Amino acid sequence: MLAPSSAPVPERGWQTAGAAGSLQKVKKLNSQDFSELRALCLSQGLLFEDTTFPAHTSSIGARLLPQEELRQIQWKRPTELQRNPYLIMDGVSRFDIMQGEIGDCWMLAALGSLTLRKQFLENVLPKDQGFQDDYAGIFHFRFWQYGEWVDVVIDDRLPTLNGRYLFVHPRTSNEFWPSLLEKAYAKLRGSYQNLNGGYLSDALVDLTGGVQVQFSLRDPPPDLEEILKAADRSRCLMGCSTPGQARRNIKLRNGIVQGHAYTITGAVKIPYKNGWKHIIRIWNPWGHGEWKGPWSDNSRQWDHVEPKYREALLRNKDDGEFWMSCENFQEQFSWLYICNSTPTFLDFGDEHCSAWSLTSYTSLWSPGLPTRRSRSSSGAASTNPQYFFKVLDHNPNTYNVAISLMQKHAEGMQDEKNLKIGFFITMGHGKHSNHVGTENSRVLKQIFFRTRDVTSYLTLSPGTYAVVPAAAEEQEFQFLLRIFTKTQDYNETPNSLTSPGLPMAVPRENQDSSYKALFLRYAKQDSTIDALQLQQLLNEVILKDEMTSLGGRFSFDSCRSILALMDLNSNGRLTLQEFGSLWQCLTKYMDIFSREDRNRSGFLDVAELKNAIQAAGKPRGAEQLPFLHAMQYSNLRGRLGFSDFACCMLRLHTMSHAFQNLAKGGSQILMTAMEWLTLVMYT
């Protein structure tokens, strides 16, 4: 096993910032293009047959079933099984899924959680397909694999045995999205056999591209109830598993299945008797079979719950879903799994959800590098490459760093045995220094596991740190390293990514709903904010991003001007609604500024400003605007920093809307002298 070095090697491979993988650049598995293949089939009047995942026992797997049963398998299309099949009927729900013969409860439990989170579901299940329009027997689904989204094309021939679905079958007889999605995932992993046993944590990541955490319920964190509530509040995917041997399907008298994966679909605290009770809602991917203990469907505990809570929470139906107390949950289950695009599940105990920045690296780890011990350092050393990151925000009571290392298997070899991988974390001075100081190069933490994805969460003081990936075995492996760091920009939008010192990869428009938390923090006890409070907010929140801060701070005069532009009541203060409009504009302009500042200088010149105005949607006939704005708002070198750019764009935006409102759809306006003076003097 290799350890950190006092002479770092610069990181190898490529680096990205923001969410790893993009749906704008989806990789096509086996180079199969869904649109082209469907168009070809439609033009020839044929139904698609996928030669890369054929209707053959090779796609099932030689060891999954006895040879006699394998020979009896028939592959049938939904149009042969049902008179009027649909891909989706009345939306997508976990109750659409019923597990079949294959032991892929780990994947279906993740899929059940996915149905609750529409922001992820739409990534996996494209809408451009179905049985009603342009049907050609071809479908496609997307999964996240090692830093990129992969589009998987399949035909719709499903394996049946003795007239029954062999694997997932829909609860509604003519709804086929669960069966087809399962087939696509089986193709991605090489065969249905490779779904017969797996890791719920892997499936959660494959369906989201997110970061996951695992908590042992044998030694649960003291804040387990708060973690569950925070994860549910921030719309994480959650699952859990029971102890015991998988695939034996031993059902206890209390209704819990041993060695089985479940979906967590809710976590709440409700009034109960004279106090409060934490309860958890859990779903069995079998589609039936429920917990029979306290808080189950017919338990007496519900008699002591107020009717409004009971009616909202209790669903007395044998659909596999049930409630359970947090105490019983810890007794009956062994592991808890939580996943989201950012580590929002670590924001428990905090009134607001935090913003996280992300840096990703892809590279190859090679064994046999020369190692040596540093006598002057308390840690081991090697010539392994190191990946540096900075911590800017620190609260000793919460986690502020999450690190995920994922080993990449060869395509079609996802079932390959995992190596024991992990990483070391040390203090460092940054990638531009010649060495990591010996007084700071001691190993702060090391973590190694024989899993595909090794993730750790830390509370680190402000400073520069290094991550050193490694493997216990003498075998090289390709890896994806992701480093999440918390910022001070608190958000109500749990999945947003702000990026101090890094280019944005997620549109900042996704952060619009953050304005309420920010407003309340700076408004103090009042219901409005003045120019001084606005100045403090903008400089402390907006300028945390290194690119926006290079151009200088927001002055008091510029903040008074911004306030006047957004102040609909002309009283010198902004209400929550007015600030919401301002915040929406600012996040949009930050995204535009980041895109147009191609050289990452922190400034825009006249040409870049012209592009920025066009990106924002310039008024018709405004060809001279970039030059005029540059003269009014730029510095001596004719460039605009973000604070000046924001003022410029806000004035353009506000005055354009003022003209449109006054002109009432025309191209001219009539104003009184007082209206004109009010407009030009205050704004």
Image: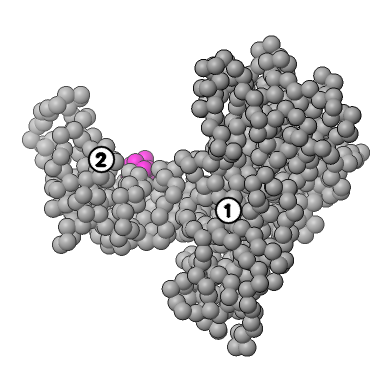
Q: Residue at x 46, y 40 (%)?
A: 24
Name the residue that disc number 2 marks.
614
Quarter of the rendering containing residue 57: top right
Q: Is residue 615 above or below residue 225?
A: above
Mark whose residue sits in front, 1 or 2 = 2
Q: Residue at x 63, y 88 (%)?
A: 375
Describe the element under mark 2 as helix, strand or loop: helix
**Residue 19: percent from the left, percent from the top?**
50, 49
Name the residue that disc number 1 marks: 343
Total labels: the figure holds: 2
Whole-angstrom CA distance, mark 1 to mark 2, is 35 Å
Towards the viewer: 494 or 268 = 494
Q: Which residues are magenta?
A: 575-584
Q: Is residue 582 magenta?
A: yes
Judge the density around disc 1: few (<14), some (14-19), many (≥20) Cα neighbours within 10 Å. Answer: many
Which quadrant of the view contains residue 412?
top right
Query: For the stretch drawn in magenta, what is the main secondary structure?
Result: helix
- 247 or 497, which lies in front? 247
